[in-house]
Amino acid sequence: MRTKGILVNRQGQKYVPPRLVEGKTGWYLTYWVTDPNKGKLVQRKYYKIPGETPAARRRKAKELIRELSTYLHEGFTIEELPKKKKKKKQKILTLLEAIDLAVQIKRGETGERSRQAYSSFQRIFEMWAKQAGLQNIPIKTVARSDIYAFLDWLIKERKVSHKTRNNYKILINALMNTLQGRKIIKKNPASRIKNLRVKGSRHIPFTREQQKFFETYLKHNEPELFLYTRFIYYGFIRPAEICRMQVGHINLESRIILVRAGDAKNSRQLPVVINPQLYKIIESMNLGRYPLNYHIFGKKFVPCPTPEHRTRFSERHTEALKACNLYNGELTLYGWKHTGNIRAYEAGVDIYSLMSQNRHSNLQETENYLRGLGLRISKELKTKEW
């Protein structure tokens, strides 16, 4: 304690006037004041010294010294004098608490489709964490090996595909980035984890014979499912997007269906053209008698305010395939989109129109997609001999 310069205020208490300290870790005012509870002088520091330049901070320090000196001389108690604010200790979150926080943040930043993905991820991740006994470990101790353990568990225990595993990796990486950005963790343990190689799409198009036979069966035995497949076949609309489609999204006058950003795979709101065949089908559905917020394919596949779970469509489609002896694990609902593209291309629809109807971001994406379906192949190679 500095004994030199001790003064006595009007209340008869000792104090040491404030002075400026230009320390390496920061500037502050230091002074000594009598603590009535301890009966002795205690040191206090004041750090709030504003100013953009050293000269400006020194000028402000002089003003604060005069002000503090007046307080001390008048006999203000220690509780009444300015105090250095103590930093609140940040609560150390557990793994599941941190993941829940990150999910809530991401759900507030993204569309409905992404919100569902994060909620689904959270349920699966909690299941793994509890099985592994890691649910209560501090989030700061989570290592890359733990993330790998989760991803390996998905494949071994949940039997997910490489593509699904890669999607989970993207989600956990995004959540950890969110925590890192808020300084809850220093490093993202999910960064720089490589994707697994993904095999080509298991969804194959229908041959003309399969298409004709299966369409006939659906018309007579599964009329609602048949209507559902027409939106995929003619509109190139993805099955999951149709599940969320409402009556108000269809404009027969303009002949477009608006796929909302929150429902679309690429999170962009874009229109789909209603071609003549799809126009007739929509007209026959008489959707004008339903409120605009009704799901076109709601519960039991009919227009209603409650959406049907997306898996029911694929389940009924699989059941229909089995009834026709067509089920092979490769003919799926998504196969109607591929089939529709092939038939449109064979009918002479230009690649720019196909790009627009598929809502691809560029022509190269459409080119790659069509080549993957066996289209846009050189005629020379098909006809020339060598």
Image (cartoon, grey):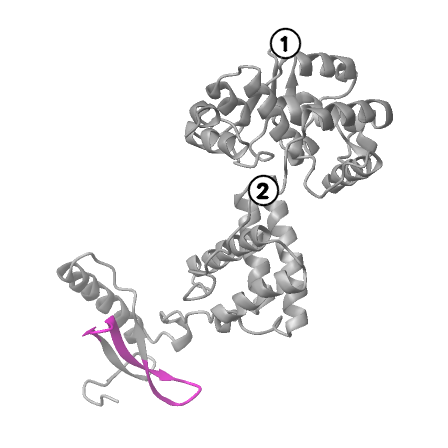
Camera sees residue 293: no
Q: Which residue is mark 2?
A: 201
Name the residue: 56% across, 22% down: 271
| Mark 1: secondary structure | loop
Dot 2, crowdedness within 10 Å: few (<14), some or many (≥20)? few
**In the shown orientation, is residue 251 left or right of residue 360?**
right
Name the residue: 64% across, 55% down: 160
Q: Quadrant of the C terminus?
A: top left
- Whole-percent x and y of residue 357? 54, 23
Name the residue: 60% across, 11% down: 254
Q: Amino acid at mark 2?
A: Ser
Q: Which residue is mark 1?
A: 253
Based on the displayed image, in which of its 4 quarters is residue 124 positioned? bottom right
- Whole-percent x and y of residue 358? 54, 27
The correct choice, above or below, for 129 with respect to 276 in the image is below
Looking at this rendering, what residue extends furthest in the front direction? 386
Based on the displayed image, in which of its 4 quarters is residue 201 positioned? top right
Q: Amino acid at mark 1?
A: Glu
